[in-house]
């Protein structure tokens, strides 16, 4: 990917947040941190993911006027429902069955109960879809079938992405914007009492105007009573929030062998200038796609003018994949960069219908045998305007 396209992706996705690396030398137990060693001096062009997979499935998402998707910004799998979030194109949440059959959509625009005018963020917890309207400052709750439950108002303060946990609590990401509660990036909020509870990750007041943007990738990973992971771009520390203890601790440290972002790296300018500066200096930095299971950790990082895929085995404490691309020989396909990792260990990629059709045309032009390839069977039935295909890889 060219540097221009890299910048364009950041802008289109809305890209985030404080590109300012903060001093995290706070009263944390640093001895509990797991070091993730990334040897960016030895990156493979392509590596196969086959050895990590138990089995896989392909789910074509049903296409109709009510279910058409422009892009996928969030994806959840809960209680046999696939919940797809398209924040900026179709501006809707579309609900499918586990086989891809269209169930319902949520696209009500307005200011009344059950309506929203901006999809700031979406989460799914305890069989409930929660849509955070960052303009109206409220969370609208729906069932997994898209039926309205209720609105939950949230006091007006600067907040962007959120993750619910416990019974009626949430963490809001605040970036570097001052509030009445102090200079915290993370704000713990009581949803039933509508009040501030705690603040985490204090930031330097001198950097409060630094890059108030959003990442298209998940900032929070995990929810409910499992640990919630928090990671920012241009920061090599992954934080873990324990909902049972209301406690935040650093849990992992990304340690690049060559050209890591230096301590104290800050650049009070636009996110584009920040990316240009880091790229020109050939720094290695976290790029997105963070996901974690009991056994694996996966993310993307940027180095030497392109993005790379990294997979770490937590039990063996060693690198498994460090490459430009992921390949899957089971389907004879190079996997896209668009993935979501579910809590039950499913790595879900989405492939645009046009990409599947082009892949099939390429297979046929090279006279490859596709008679036993189920992706080829799916591709034969697609049209250019069809919804994406979900490729679900169940990890070992």
Image (cartoon, rainbow, N blue to C red):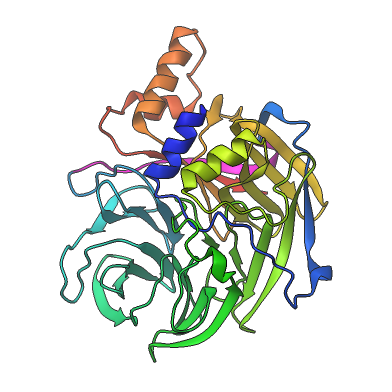
Q: Position of residue 106 (x, y in %)?
A: 24, 61
Q: What residue appears at the point 69 percent right and 48 percent down from the top-left corner?
A: 261
Q: Residue furthest front?
A: 206
Question: Where is 91 relative to 377, above or below?
Answer: below
Seen in the picture, residue 40 relative to 144 is either above or below; the reply is above
* Number of marks present in the image shown: 0
- Residue at 53% over, 54% down: 268
Please tell me which residue lies in front, 342 or 171: 171
Question: Where is 290 relative to 326, above or below?
Answer: below
Quarter of the rendering containing residue 133: bottom left
The residue depicted at 63 percent of the width and 58 percent of the height is 21
Tell me residue 274's x, y (percent): 54, 45
Q: Nearer the viewer, residue 281 or 158?
A: 281
Residue range (magenta): 50-64
- Name the foreground residue: 101 vs 150: 150
Q: Can residue 322 be seen in the rendering of this structure?
A: yes
Image location (x, y in percent) of residue 377: 40, 26
Is residue 57 located in the magenta-colored stretch of the structure? yes
- The answer to whether residue 25 is magenta is no
Give 358 or 154, whichever is nearer the viewer: 154
Locate residue 47, reporting x and y percent.
Answer: 68, 30
Query: Could you tell whether 374 is left or right of 32 in the image?
Result: left
Q: Is residue 363 left or right of residue 71?
A: right
Residue 392 appears in the figure: no
Rendered view: 357 above or below 214: above
Left-right relation of 394 to 143: right
């Amino acid at each position: 990917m060219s540097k221009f396209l890299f910048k364009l992706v950041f802008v289109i996705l809305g890209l985030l947040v404080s590109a300012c690396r903060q001093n995290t030398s706070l009263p944390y137990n640093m001895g509990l941190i797991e070091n993730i060693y990334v040897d960016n001096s030895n990156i493979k062009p392509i590596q196969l993911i086959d050895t990590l997979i138990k089995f896989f499935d392909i789910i074509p998402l049903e296409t109709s006027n009510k279910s058409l998707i422009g892009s996928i910004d969030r994806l959840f799998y809960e209680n046999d429902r696939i919940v797809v979030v398209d924040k900026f194109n179709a501006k809707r949440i579309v609900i499918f069955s586990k086989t891809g059959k269209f169930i319902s959509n949520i696209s009500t625009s307005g200011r009344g109960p059950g309506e929203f005018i901006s999809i700031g963020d979406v989460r799914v917890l305890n069989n409930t879809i929660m849509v955070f309207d960052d303009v109206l400052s409220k969370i609208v709750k729906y069932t997994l079938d898209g039926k309205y439950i209720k609105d939950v108002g949230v006091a007006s303060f600067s907040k962007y992405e959120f993750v619910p946990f416990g019974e009626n609590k949430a963490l809001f990401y605040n970036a570097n914007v001052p509030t009445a509660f102090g200079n915290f990036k993370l704000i713990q909020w009581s949803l039933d009492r509508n009040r501030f509870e705690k603040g985490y990750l204090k930031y330097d007041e001198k950097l409060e105007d630094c890059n108030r943007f959003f990442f298209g990738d998940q900032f929070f990973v995990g929810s409910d009573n499992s640990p919630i992971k928090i990671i920012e771009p241009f920061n090599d520390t992954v934080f873990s929030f324990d909902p049972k203890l209301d406690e935040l601790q650093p849990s992992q440290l990304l340690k690049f062998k060559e050209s890591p972002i230096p301590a104290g790296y800050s650049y009070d300018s636009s996110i584009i200038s920040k990316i240009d500066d880091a790229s020109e200096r050939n720094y290695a930095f976290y790029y997105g796609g963070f996901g974690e299971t009991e056994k694996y950790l996966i993310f993307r990082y940027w180095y030497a003018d392109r993005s790379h895929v990294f997979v770490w085995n937590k039990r063996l404490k060693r690198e498994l994949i460090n490459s430009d691309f992921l390949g899957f020989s089971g389907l004879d396909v190079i996997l896209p960069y668009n993935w979501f990792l579910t809590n039950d260990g499913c790595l879900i990629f989405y492939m645009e219908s046009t990409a599947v059709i082009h892949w099939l045309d390429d297979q046929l032009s090279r006279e490859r045998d596709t008679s036993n390839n189920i992706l080829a069977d799916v591709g034969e039935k697609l049209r250019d305007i069809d919804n994406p295909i979900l490729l679900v890889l169940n990890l070992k």
